[in-house]
């Protein structure tokens, strides 16, 4: 289990707010770790800042994954960062409208974001600006849909032998 | 001098034109020579040296993250089997723990210890595959045939516990589906007694073997700072010299009560990765022994699940004779139990790195989003940087020592 260290969470929030005052939309301590929502136009600077600040040193990108929020018509990216020096984890979120899903890349911050961003592009259609090679990675190249979006059906829609309403779906 | 010979050219310097080098494109794959899964590398070769390489992945993509959005939680367990299928029980346990974290279920100590026994057995099985295959790829088949008997024995233990061998679907949310039988304990104790000798024999065959060392020392080294920026975890990161282990840094499942050493390497080459895994197998043996001792000390010999009726199927006698139990049985099997809304990230030390589950629930019957942090998907990106400028035969050895599992790579 992850240790929740209140002082450290407060330090991260205070530093980020002093640096990017208007761009931090929300910060809350979730059940497992601190979660900060950042506006998409500063995301790359925030990640650089978290990586390079002497006291924070979030030097390790644990995961990067996409999200789809149909209610607000937004696509999101969730970064899990880990500071090996302080053994502390945080979650950073950002989002962009489905109509214009452009978010700057984290590949320049961590090379490990490369494939993870390609995967996110492949499944959600988020366009990472500045990515060296933003092409599909797991799906076939000529696919046109973005399958992890909520409006992409999982099962064959032409079948009529399964009635989802019986199963609470 | 013979007449009629044109000597005009003799004095002129012969200008050697630097012709552009001719590179060959080599398709390694779509299958790996030792079939660790379906891999393809398009390599640009200068003779036997690799100029550049590009990996193609996704041949066995099965859309687990999408499927998981339609399934009740307990039905996601078999999907996790198929990520790193060499150590499926670790994936199963990691998934159960993620859901328990979301639901706030506290598992009894006995469940934790049982899980640790299973997870460490799985780690040994996975390391056996990886290390003996490093031997095979360097031309030594003997070690492989020796150690695989022991892996086979671990699979027999799985079979006694849950009924299946490779894709185990072991355990339930909250614990196990049944208690371990006496036969399981008998087999685990037999394994603990016999395996160290076999492992030592294997190590004697390879560790100081001249040919093996020539093939592996300084092959595919990777500096620590690059490894960190490429998201290395697990034995590959430890071989580069950093003692990061999820079991120690973020203990789960009562690992904080256990006493073990994290082995680290120095240069992160193939030999270091091999030796780190060797030592980890020994440490895993010690952890299993400690878990057995702790289980012996516990007075409770019967508990094998948390008392949470939401996810643990009631016993069959009750289902047949008791109305409430029947209702719960149906609710669980149909996946109609309520899940609180929330999001949680949980990670376990998988056999090849930090295996993470990012689970977002909106309160429905299924996960609204489930993302797997698949360690080898992240560190396999570094492969071109590791092999460029080396020889093809070394590149194959580097790949097998990284323990890239296609099932996990492609999800």
Image: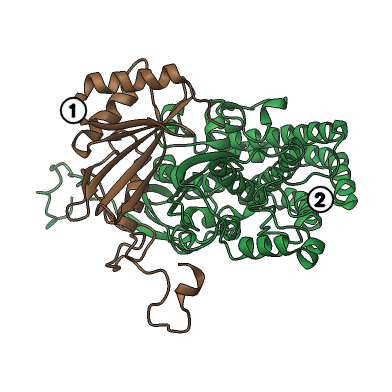
Chain colours: A brown, B green
Please indicate whether residue A105 sits to the left or right of residue B144 in the image. left
* Residue of label 2: B179
Q: Nearer the viewer, residue A149 or A119?
A: A149
In the depicted view, which residue is nearer to us: A29 or B192? A29
* Location of residue B139 with respect to A28 vertically, above or below: below
- The image shows a total of numbered marks equal to 2
Residue drawn at point x = 69 percent, y = 53 percent: B312
Q: Secondary structure at mark 1?
A: helix
Residue B28, position as x, y percentages in the image: 45, 59
Q: Is residue A10 above or below residue B37?
A: above
Q: Residue at x 36, y 38 (%)?
A: A79
> Label for residue B299?
none
Name the residue that disc number 1 marks. A22
x and y percent of residue A61 in the render?
40, 35
Residue depicted at x 67% and y 31%: B255
* Residue B227 appears in the rendering: yes
Q: Which of the 4 quarters of the picture holds residue A70?
A: bottom left
In whole angstroms, how far apart are the C-alphas of marks 1 and 2? 56 Å
Q: Is residue B139 visible?
A: no
Could you say whether the residue bearing mark 2 is in a helix, strand or loop? loop
Chain identifier of the residue bearing label 2 in the image: B
Q: Local crowd at mark 1 within 10 Å, few (<14), some, or many (≥20)?
A: few
- Rendering coords of residue B97 (x, y %): 60, 43
């Amino acid at each position: 289990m992850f240790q929740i260290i209140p002082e450290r969470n407060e330090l991260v929030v205070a530093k980020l707010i002093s640096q990017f005052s208007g761009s931090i939309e929300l910060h809350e301590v979730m059940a497992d770790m601190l979660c900060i929502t950042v506006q998409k136009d500063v995301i790359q600077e925030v990640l650089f800042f978290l990586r390079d600040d002497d006291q924070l040193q979030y030097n390790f990108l644990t995961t990067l994954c996409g999200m789809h929020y149909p209610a607000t018509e937004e696509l999101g990216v969730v970064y899990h960062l880990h500071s090996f020096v302080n053994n502390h984890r945080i979650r950073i979120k950002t989002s962009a409208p489905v109509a214009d899903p452009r978010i700057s890349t984290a590949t320049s911050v961590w090379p490990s974001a490369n494939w993870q961003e390609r995967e996110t592009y492949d499944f959600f259609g988020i366009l990472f600006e500045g990515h060296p090679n933003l092409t599909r990675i797991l799906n076939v190249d000529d696919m046109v849909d973005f399958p992890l979006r909520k409006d992409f059906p999982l099962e064959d829609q032409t079948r009529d032998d399964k009635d989802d309403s019986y199963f609470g779906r | 001098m013979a007449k009629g010979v044109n000597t005009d050219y003799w004095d002129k310097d012969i200008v050697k034109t630097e012709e552009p080098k001719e590179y060959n494109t080599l398709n390694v794959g779509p299958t790996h020579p030792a079939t660790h899964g379906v891999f393809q590398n398009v390599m640009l070769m200068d003779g036997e040296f690799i100029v550049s390489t590009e990996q193609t992945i996704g041949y066995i993509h099965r859309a687990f993250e999408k499927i998981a959005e339609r399934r009740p939680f307990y039905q996601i367990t078999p999907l996790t089997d198929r990520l790193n299928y060499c150590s499926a029980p670790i994936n199963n346990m990691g998934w159960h723990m993620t859901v328990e974290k979301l639901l706030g279920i506290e598992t009894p100590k006995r469940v934790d210890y049982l899980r640790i026994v299973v997870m460490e057995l799985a780690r040994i099985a996975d390391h056996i595959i990886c290390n003996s295959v490093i031997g095979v790829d360097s031309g030594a088949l003997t070690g492989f045939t020796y150690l695989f008997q022991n892996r086979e024995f671990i699979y027999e233990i799985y079979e006694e516990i849950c009924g299946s061998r490779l894709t185990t679907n072991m355990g339930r949310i909250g614990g196990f589906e049944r208690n371990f039988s006496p036969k399981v304990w008998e087999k685990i104790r037999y394994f603990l007694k016999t395996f160290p000798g076999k492992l030592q024999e294997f190590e004697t065959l390879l560790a100081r073997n001249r040919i093996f060392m020539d093939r592996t020392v300084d092959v595919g080294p990777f500096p620590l700072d690059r490894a960190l920026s490429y998201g290395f975890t697990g034995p590959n990161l430890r071989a580069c010299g950093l003692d990061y282990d999820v079991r120690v840094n973020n203990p789960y499942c009562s690992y904080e009560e256990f006493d073990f050493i994290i082995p680290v390497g120095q240069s992160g080459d193939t030999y270091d990765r091999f030796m780190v895994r060797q030592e980890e197998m020994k440490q895993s043996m010690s952890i299993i022994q400690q878990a057995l001792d702790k289980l012996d000390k516990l007075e409770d010999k019967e508990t094998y699940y948390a008392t949470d009726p939401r996810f643990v199927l009631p016993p069959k006698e009750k289902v047949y004779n008791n109305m409430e139990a029947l209702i719960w049985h149906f609710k669980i099997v149909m996946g109609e139990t309520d899940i609180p809304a929330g999001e949680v990230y949980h990670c376990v030390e998988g056999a090849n790195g930090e295996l993470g589950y990012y689970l977002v629930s909106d309160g429905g019957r299924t996960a609204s989003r489930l993302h797997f942090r698949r360690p080898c998907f992240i560190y396999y990106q570094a492969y071109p940087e590791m092999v460029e400028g080396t020889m093809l035969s070394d590149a194959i050895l580097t790949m097998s020592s990284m323990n890239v599992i296609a099932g996990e790579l492609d999800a």
